[in-house]
Amino acid sequence: MYQKIILSLALDHGISQKAIQTARALLAEGGQVIAVHVYEPLQGSVNAYVSEEAVAKAQQNTKDLLAKRVGDADDLEAVLLKGHSGRAITDYADKIGADCIIVGSHKPGLRDYFLGSTAARIVRHAPCSVHVLR
């Protein structure tokens, strides 16, 4: 059983209910589940063509969607990180002393045949156990 679980939610994939159930099953009594989504900033020159207001609105929409996905679950804390998904999650896990990360593996392309790229990065670089959901 784990004391501090990071639940990595990709808000555009439908694995969250399964992930939440898995986190609850793996959680030790008195433990904590932190539902995390990573907001990836716009890359390169694209950023020059998007207004700050549009970026702020997109971030707020993401926060709202994360809150909706977590719902009224008293046992989940929602956290929105900013950065590259795989790196932001592993850095956050190290920072808070998480002992497990639950991540879903999406339908991979040829390059990431067995795991999605975010899941693969988390598995390789996490400072703790990783539970990958299919």
Image (cartoon, grey):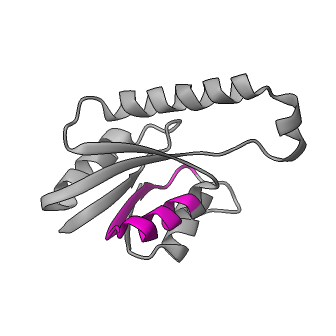
Q: Residue at x 70, y 44 (%)?
A: 41
On-image quarter of the C terminus: bottom left
Q: Position of residue 10 (x, y in %)?
A: 50, 43
- Near-viewer residue (108 or 69): 69
Residue 30 in view in this figure = yes
Q: Position of residue 53 (x, y in %)?
A: 71, 23
Query: 122 above or below 18?
Result: below
- Near-viewer residue (120 or 73): 73
Q: Residue at x 38, y 75 (%)?
A: 128
Residue 114 in view in this figure = no
Residue 71 falls within the magenta-colored stretch: no
Q: Position of residue 91 (x, y in %)?
A: 52, 66
On-image quarter of the N terminus: bottom left
Q: Based on the displayed image, in which of its 4 quarters is residue 61 positioned? A: top right
Extreme residue in the left direction: 29
Q: Is residue 11 left or right of residue 72?
A: right
Q: Residue at x 82, y 38 (%)?
A: 47
Q: Position of residue 117 (x, y in %)?
A: 62, 60
Q: Residue at x 56, y 49 (%)?
A: 107
Q: Is residue 110 left or right of residue 16?
A: right
Q: Is residue 72 left or right of residue 105?
A: left
Q: Is residue 52 left or right of residue 85?
A: right
- Near-viewer residue (129 or 127): 127
Q: Which contiguous range is marked in magenta?
A: 88-107
Residue 103 falls within the magenta-colored stretch: yes
The total number of labels drawn is 0
